[in-house]
Image: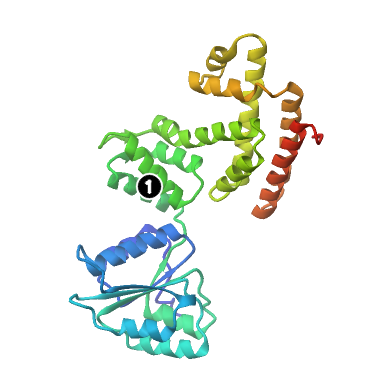
């Protein structure tokens, strides 16, 4: 049996194909990564409109909120003083029987002056409709890039932003930032704003610039916990869990408790912020911040805090359910606050 004519691509080659090939009448973007989907849409929009305006010839529809007859009517409308019209259908899902017939009729005879883009998270190839849609369209995967493709993308993105990434810097960046293309892109833009045009970023630059965001989060977490701010700490947790694995939050807490414990011992020895700065290798303003954070914290509290954190860490490593993991961390934060206020004893 001959192999299928169309195979979904999940590499830089797919994006390059869209960029370099002639504009197609129908595109099907399949996958959950919104950042990569926007990359594809940006390329398609650029191919359709070039540097010209798109005000009158660019329509975006949400499938759940738009009647299919309206979409097809717009798709069959001639563009206004332009060569092409672009119609995007976001959050597309399997249509009902009547809508399916309308769409299939269009797929058989698409408008030569319209580029129609379907954006869908999954396709069910067991259905006749999606089989027909795949056959009629330019199929592109929009799941996150992986492995060498992701490294090439990072290198190319950095070059577009005006700097170069060494390979070891790319490795460190991928280690420090969880695989989210949106987060990676944000970090690259941050690096570009720190460096001179044409600079080469190595391990030290990544550690200094990218690490700063987590360092600042660590400071905020310390302030929030030391002040007994339940709402503030829970907000930080939820914000982190939008982009990070819960284990990252545990790592921040572990680092924080270590700094607190050492700082407390140094303060008792009469060394204060200057000693904290020298022993932990931190800037003076950070040392002063730590000194303020540990003023109201006792040694017993810190020992119990660390013991409870180890229990939570073991539980998190036994579950892959993010909801359960977040609940465990929320309970930990609530218990920590209760213990500090004397209303609950942490085991």
Within the image, what quadrant is residue 329 found in?
top right
Spot occupied by residue 135 in the image (x, y as percentages of width and height): 40, 80
On screen, residue 332 above or below 42? above
Spot occupied by residue 228 in the image (x, y as percentages of width and height): 67, 34
Identity of the residue drawn at 30% across and 45% down: 161
Does any portion of residue 338 appear in the rendered image?
yes
Spot occupied by residue 69 in the image (x, y as percentages of width and height): 40, 86
Does any portion of residue 313 appear in the rendered image?
no
On screen, residue 223 above or below 189? above
- Which residue is tagged 1? 154
Going by the picture, which residue comes out furthest to the top?
A: 270
Q: Is residue 77 left or right of residue 181?
A: left
On screen, residue 281 above or below 312? above
Q: Nearer the viewer, residue 88 or 296?
A: 296
Q: Is residue 85 left or right of residue 284?
A: left
Within the image, what quadrant is residue 40 found in?
bottom left
Identity of the residue drawn at 40% across and 48% down: 185
Going by the picture, which residue comes out furthest to the left?
A: 81
Q: Is residue 257 left or right of residue 288?
A: right
The C terminus: image quadrant: top right
The secondary structure type at the circle numbered 1 is: helix
């Amino acid at each position: 049996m001959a192999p299928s004519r169309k195979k979904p691509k999940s590499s830089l080659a797919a994006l390059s194909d869209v960029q370099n090939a002639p504009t197609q009448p129908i595109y099907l973007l399949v996958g959950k990564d919104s950042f990569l989907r926007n990359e594809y849409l940006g390329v398609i929009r650029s191919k359709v409109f070039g540097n010209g305006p798109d005000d009158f010839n660019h329509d975006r529809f949400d499938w759940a909120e738009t009647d299919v007859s309206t979409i097809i009517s717009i798709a069959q409308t001639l563009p206004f003083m332009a060569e092409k019209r672009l119609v995007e259908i976001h959050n597309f899902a399997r249509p009902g029987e009547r809508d399916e017939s309308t769409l299939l009729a269009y797929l058989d005879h698409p408008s030569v002056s319209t580029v129609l883009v379907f954006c869908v998270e999954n396709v069910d190839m067991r259905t006749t409709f999606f089989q027909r849609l795949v056959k009629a369209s330019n199929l592109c995967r929009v799941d996150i890039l992986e492995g060498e493709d992701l490294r090439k993308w990072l290198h190319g993105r950095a070059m577009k932003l005006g700097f170069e990434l060494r390979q070891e810097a790319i490795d460190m960046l991928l280690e420090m930032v969880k695989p989210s293309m949106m987060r990676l892109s944000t970090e690259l833009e941050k690096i570009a704003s720190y460096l001179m045009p044409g600079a080469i970023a190595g391990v030290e630059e990544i550690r200094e610039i990218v690490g700063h965001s987590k360092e600042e989060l660590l400071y905020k977490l310390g302030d929030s916990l030391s002040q007994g701010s339940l709402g503030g700490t829970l907000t930080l947790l939820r914000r982190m869990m939008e982009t990070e694995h819960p284990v990252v939050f545990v790592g921040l807490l572990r680092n924080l408790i270590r700094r607190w414990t050492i700082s407390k011992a140094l303060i008792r020895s009469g060394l204060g912020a200057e000693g904290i700065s020298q022993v932990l290798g931190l800037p003076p303003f950070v040392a002063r911040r730590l000194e303020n954070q540990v003023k109201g914290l006792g040694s017993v509290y810190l020992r119990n805090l660390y013991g409870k954190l180890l229990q939570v860490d073991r539980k998190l490593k036994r579950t892959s359910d993010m909801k359960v993991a977040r609940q465990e961390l929320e309970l930990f934060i609530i218990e920590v606050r209760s213990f500090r206020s004397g209303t609950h004893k942490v085991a």
